[in-house]
Amino acid sequence: MAHSLPDPTGPLIGEKAPLSSLASLYPPSSPFLPMLSSISLSYPSFRAVRGDGSCAYRALLYGLCLGAVGSPPERERVAEVVRGSLKVLEGLGYDATAVEIFYDELLGLFGEVLVGKGEADVHAALTGDSAEYYTWYMRLLTSAHLKSNAGRFEPYLTGHADVASFCAAEVEPAGKECEQVQVIALAEALGVRVSVVYLDGHDEGGKFTEHVFGPEGAAIGISMLYRPGHYDLLFKD
């Protein structure tokens, strides 16, 4: 089924735009168009994310930062999650000296960079020089949660002997695309609610499919659009 994905060399995070603008990517007969129209009624705008394999991590982090700058207690809560993650990674066998630079960058994002800031500052931070450091540590947070809960996640992994081999092959390498299991793990690790809306051409009676992951009652909610092989960030306003 034909679909179009963003340029892997485009902006890390695009400017907010009408979701309906994606219609220009599809021919008039495309089954994606009716579903796109339906989604646009609930989520009228979006930010396109670079299609380089790290889109889910980048989109989720962007939504997390937007929620954190609007709530100082949540910003500090997330900083505490990151602060405690290095010891968890060490306990799982990671070399602290190899990952510390990435840890320091992400901790600094929530501990200093975003203090008293707004959406424009989030955009500047997540499209700046440290953006890829943040993204890669998000992969490590995902791996740590998967490995710490291996018994629960292992039955859902296909083609891999165990969680460790899955993380080594599918989570930690830069550019590896994110599957549903990684989204679930990262939402749980960060204590946020993540809604994934599917633009996949499968129209369920005129309704789009939306799956929600993460703890119920979480203060930060993030919505992402999934097109086959890619995630963007959605907005209701």
Image (tube, rainbow, N blue to C red):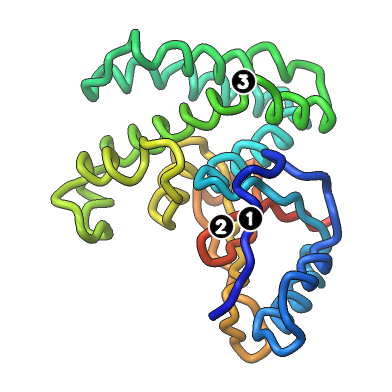
Labels 1 and 2: the sequence-earlier one: 1
User: Which x, y percent locates residue 22?
Assistant: 76, 66
Which is more foreground, mark 1 or mark 2?
2
Task: Return the x and y of residue 160 as percentages of the image width and height.
Answer: 19, 53
Assess disc 2: are there few (<14), some (14-19) or many (≥20) residues with their C-alpha within 10 Å of its C-alpha: many
Foreground label between 1 and 3: 3
Asked if disc 1 and disc 2 are in contact, CB closer than 8 Å, the reply is no
Q: Amino acid at mark 1?
A: Met
Q: Secondary structure at mark 2?
A: strand
Q: Earlier in the sequence, mark 1 or mark 3?
A: 3
Alpha-carbon span between mark 1 and mark 3: 23 Å
* In the rendered image, the vertical position of residue 143 relative to residue 235, given as above or below: above
* For the residues bearing labels 2 and 3, Cβ distance under 8 angstroms: no
Find the residue positioned furthest to the top.
97
> From the viewer's perspective, is 116 left or right of 216?
right
Q: What residue lies at 72% left-to-right and 55% top-to-bottom?
A: 234
- Identity of the amino acid at label 2? His
> Which label's residue is closer to the chain start, 2 or 3?
3
Amino acid at the residue labelled 3: Ser
Q: Is residue 68 left or right of residue 152?
A: right
Q: Position of residue 175 (x, y in %)?
A: 46, 42
Query: What residue would you read off at disc 3?
Result: 130
Q: Secondary structure at mark 1?
A: strand
Tell me the distance, in whole angstroms, between the alpha carbons under discs 1 and 2: 10 Å
Q: Residue at x 56, y 28 (%)?
A: 132
For label 1, count other residues whose C-alpha is less than 10 Å away and answer few (under 14), some (14-19) or many (20+). Answer: many
Quadrant of the image for the C terminus?
A: bottom right
Foreground of the two, 83 or 74: 83
| Up-down relation of residue 25 to residue 79 (above or below) | below
Indicate which disc residue 230 carries: 2
- Label ID, residue 224: 1
Across and down, in percent, residue 150 comes to 23, 44
